[in-house]
């Protein structure tokens, strides 16, 4: 089996590669990434890309010739990966997240790839009442990032058939340690606040609902999507990935962190404009389709493990929200130093 993973050099990618390396020891694993965050390593014992058999440093908008040859499964993670980046680089987000994804699917199908796994997002539910959103619920995207994910899902459907199985994994918000940790994700941010400042500052009124999932459990879901039998589902499938127990309100997450890390204060910004992005999600379909791939990590161990990871990194930067652990900051810094053009394409690697 030959598996190509795009965007393997980000936050989730190294965890996915580790998992696939263990589950499919004889598979040929290939990475393809433009390397925006290549040097943002955290606590890695080895360069994570030593685990793949071949690494392309390439842009998904300009696929290297032959990169899809004999590939059986494609895991598509490469993207501009959150709302702040999507808002700052709206057109590029559309080009990478939507246009390039559709072209990648088209060429994958043409090349005979059998399984296409797309990293989608529950953020497409945007806002709503407190009832859990199912895959059939109305989508209510509030950001360019969420819109790019919806449009991609919609246009991917046309390619699916019994030889080309497409699975859109609508992931909950990720959390947990990675060899390229990012701290612009809510639980990671709270643990970093607790470790570095002994105070968790919540940037909203704390009420929004947000489902979470640990990166290692995301990797397991990706494995399921590669091996799933379409007879048990559909050639095209969009499914919420997470677990009912991990639907939290933001303030509950802060409190959970404060229970595990002693002497931490929580400050809720009572005057904050309420965060409109609030969604509870139902994971019934995932539970039904993938009983053996359900999330396993619990919130306490996720927090503990993040804390231990940050401490062993000697992490102590109270200004981390303005540091290289924030994806938007890395991109804007590289761009201001002249490494990218307006399209976020490398123009100067010196
Ligand atoms: N982190 C989350 O909470 C979360 C939740 C739901 C879905 N997702 C999706 O999962 C995927 C991975 O997320 P992540 O947290 O690892 O993000 P990340 O930003 O850490 O990693 C994304 C990777 O994609 C690469 N990339 C971006 N544009 C590229 C291009 N044009 N060509 C080649 N490579 C490119 C980057 O260099 C980076 O290594 C994304 O599609 C994201 O939208 C993430």
Image (cartoon, rainbow, N blue to C red):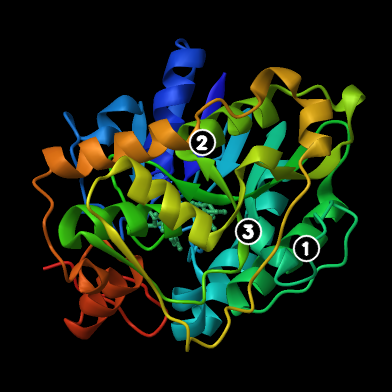
At 54% across and 88% down in the image, what residue appears? 273
Residue at the (87%, 67%) spot, across then down: 138
In the image shown, does 61 or 303 lie closer to the viewer? Answer: 303
Q: Work out which quarter of the rendered image holds the N terminus and state it.
A: top right
Q: Is mark 1 within 8 Å of ligand 1?
A: no
Q: Quadrant of the C terminus?
A: bottom left
- Where does residue 47 sit, x and y in percent of width and height? 20, 35
Q: Position of residue 287 (x, y in %)?
A: 78, 29
- Alpha-carbon neighbours of circle 1 within 10 Å: few (<14), some, or many (≥20)? few
Rounded to the nearest angstrom, the CA distance separating label 1 from label 2 is 38 Å
Which label was assigned to residue 101? 3
Q: Residue 105: x percent and y percent?
A: 69, 51
Residue 176 marker: none
Residue 227 to residue 304: above or below: above
Q: Earlier in the sequence, mark 3 or mark 2?
A: 2
SS of the residue under disc 2: strand
Can you see residue 17? Answer: yes
Reply above or below: 124 against 119.
below
User: Closer to us: mark 1 or mark 2?
Assistant: 1
Q: Quadrant of residue 249?
A: bottom right
Q: Nearer the viewer, mark 1 or mark 3?
A: 1
Judge by depth and name the residue closer to the eye, 237 or 181.
181
Residue nearest the viewer, comparing 350 with 92: 92
The CB of the residue at mark 2 lies under 8 Å from ligand 1: no
User: Whole-percent x and y of residue 6?
Assistant: 48, 46
Q: Which mark is residue 130?
A: 1
Q: Is residue 99 left or right of residue 61?
A: right
User: How far apart are labels 1 and 3 at the CA level?
Assistant: 32 Å
Residues packed near mark 3 inside 10 Å, few (<14), some (14 to 19) or many (20 plus): many
Q: Which mark is residue 4?
A: 2
Sequence order check: which comes first, mark 1 or mark 2? 2
- Helix, strand, or loop for circle 1? loop
């Amino acid at each position: 089996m030959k598996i190509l993973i795009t965007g393997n050099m980000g936050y989730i990618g190294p965890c996915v590669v580790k998992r696939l390396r263990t589950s499919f020891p004889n598979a040929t694993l290939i990475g393809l990434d433009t390397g925006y965050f290549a040097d943002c390593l955290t606590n890695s014992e080895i360069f994570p890309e030593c685990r793949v058999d071949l690494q392309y440093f390439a842009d998904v908008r300009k696929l290297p010739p032959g990169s899809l040859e004999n590939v059986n499964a494609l895991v598509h993670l490469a993207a501009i990966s959150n709302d702040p980046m999507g808002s700052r680089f709206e057109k590029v987000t559309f080009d990478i997240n939507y246009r390039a994804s559709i072209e990648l699917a088209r060429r994958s199908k043409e090349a005979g790839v059998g399984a296409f796994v797309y990293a989608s997002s529950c953020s497409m539910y945007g806002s709503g009442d407190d009832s859990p959103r199912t895959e059939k619920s109305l989508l209510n995207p509030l950001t360019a990032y969420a819109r790019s994910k919806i449009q991609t899902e919609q246009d991917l459907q046309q390619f699916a058939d019994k030889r080309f199985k497409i699975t859109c994994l609508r992931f909950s918000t990720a959390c947990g340690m990675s060899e390229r940790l990012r701290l612009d994700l809510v639980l990671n941010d709270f643990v970093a606040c607790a470790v570095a400042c002994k105070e968790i500052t919540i940037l909203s009124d704390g009420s929004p609902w947000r489902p979470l999932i640990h990166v290692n459990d995301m990797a397991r879901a990706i494995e399921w999507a590669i091996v799933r039998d379409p007879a048990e589902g559909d050639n095209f499938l969009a499914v919420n990935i997470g677990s009912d127990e991990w639907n939290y309100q933001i303030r509950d997450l802060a409190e959970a962190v404060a229970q595990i890390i002693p002497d931490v204060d929580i400050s809720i910004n009572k005057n904050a404009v309420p965060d409109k992005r609030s969604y509870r999600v139902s994971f019934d379909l995932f539970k039904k389709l993938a009983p053996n791939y359900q999330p396993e990590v619990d919130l306490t161990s996720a927090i503990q493990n993040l804390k231990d990871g940050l401490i062993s990194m000697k992490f102590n930067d109270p200004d981390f929200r303005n540091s290289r652990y924030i994806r938007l900051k890395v991109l804007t810094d590289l761009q201001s130093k002249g490494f990218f053009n307006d399209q976020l394409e490398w123009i100067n690697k010196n």
